[in-house]
Amino acid sequence: MRKKHSRMQNQYCTFSYFYLKIKVRKEGNTMEYQTLNNGLKMPIVGFGVFRVPDKKECEESVYQAIKAGYRLIDTAASYTNEDAVGAGVKRAIEEGVCTRKDLFITSTMWVQDMKNYETAKKAIDASIEKSGLGYLDLYLLHQAMGDYFSAWRAMEDAYKEGKLKAIGVSNFYAHVLVNFVNTVEIKPMVNQVELHPYYTQEKAIETMKYYDVIPEAWAPLGGGRYKPFEDEMLKGIAAKYNKSVGQVLLRWNVQRGVVVVPKSTHVERIKENIDIFDFELNEEEMKQISSLNMGYSGSRAKHFDVEFVEMCLAKKIHD
């Protein structure tokens, strides 16, 4: 019988628990890893390609990211650039920058394909085919919408067949995640949700930890909505470590045990975002940054809203 889910009183204790797990998995001075509940190692800093629809720009950005040391690349069917990601990966492999086994490629099934088992199965095969990489290291459900239980069963089967090395979910709020992990056969390994200092989601992270699901952040820099680069407190912490505000925000999440996938198409920013393993925020700084939390308010994406759900259900990414 599962023991009662006890809540931690000190939010920093939750953060520290994850970070201690990460530190023992550090390899060299360039990357740290989280270990998924199936034993697979996932880099804690990755490269995202959200809103990079131009194929050439996406391919070049992925290639430059891999050259800079990234090994986790995060895309999604709804981004319509899975093929460009695959092209950038193949280019890096052909030039000897890395091997396929070195990489951790993630994609995500869109709501349109979560109608039933068969549509989900076709979506999985389509993502693999578009990438041209033979398999995906992680595949996620984009939202808890449609018949996502049937879609998950298709993902479980693809996982058993070796097409997907790990499977997970995205935007599953804590109550949805708890019901889900206690219903499905194979527990999700990752939950990708909005996580940044303006939406810290401590209780959600605690729930993920309890069920051994790794938290992954989309919009780890705030998604362009909160002006963190103008915040004097953040600028002060950044100056102390001779880092940028962006590096401080990423470091804050990493020390909470959160995988981050920042996006940029600028080479210098790409390099900057991965250069966060040579400093460590102290406990007081972690608390200061967490104090920016606005909760479920402001301009953040609100997945509970009827209008948002209707928008997702109506969005078509293919015929």
Image (spheres, rainbow, N blue to C red):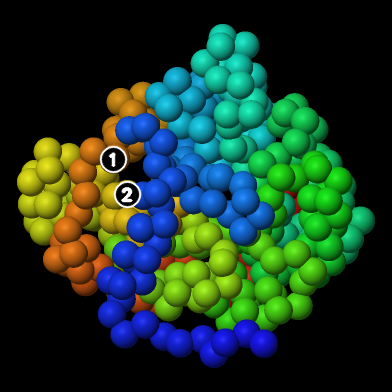
Residue at x-position 41% and y-position 36%: 27
Front in this rendered view, residue 114 or 172: 172
Regarding mark 1 in the picture, which secondary structure is present there?
Answer: loop
Residue 307, image quadrant: bottom right
Residue 203, position as x, y percentages in the image: 43, 78
Instruction: Give residue 276's mark.
Output: 1
Residue at x-position 69% and y-position 75%: 180
Q: Earlier in the sequence, mark 2 or mark 1?
A: 2
Residue 145, position as x, y percentages in the image: 71, 69
Few, some or many residues within 10 Å of mark 2 (<14, 14–19, 20+): many
| Amino acid residing under circle 1 | Ile
Instruction: Give residue 250's mark.
Output: 2
Residue 202, position as x, y percentages in the image: 38, 74
Residue 8, position as x, y percentages in the image: 37, 82
Instruction: Give residue 109's mark.
Output: none
Tell whether label 1 touches label 2 (CB within 8 Å).
Answer: yes
Residue at x-position 59% and y-position 37%: 104
Regarding mark 2 in the picture, which secondary structure is present there?
Answer: helix
Instruction: Report if residue 205 is visible in the image.
Output: yes
Q: Is residue 267 above or below residue 262?
A: above
Few, some or many residues within 10 Å of mark 1 (<14, 14–19, 20+): many
Question: Which quarter shows the N terminus?
Answer: bottom right
Q: Is residue 141 above or below residue 262?
A: below
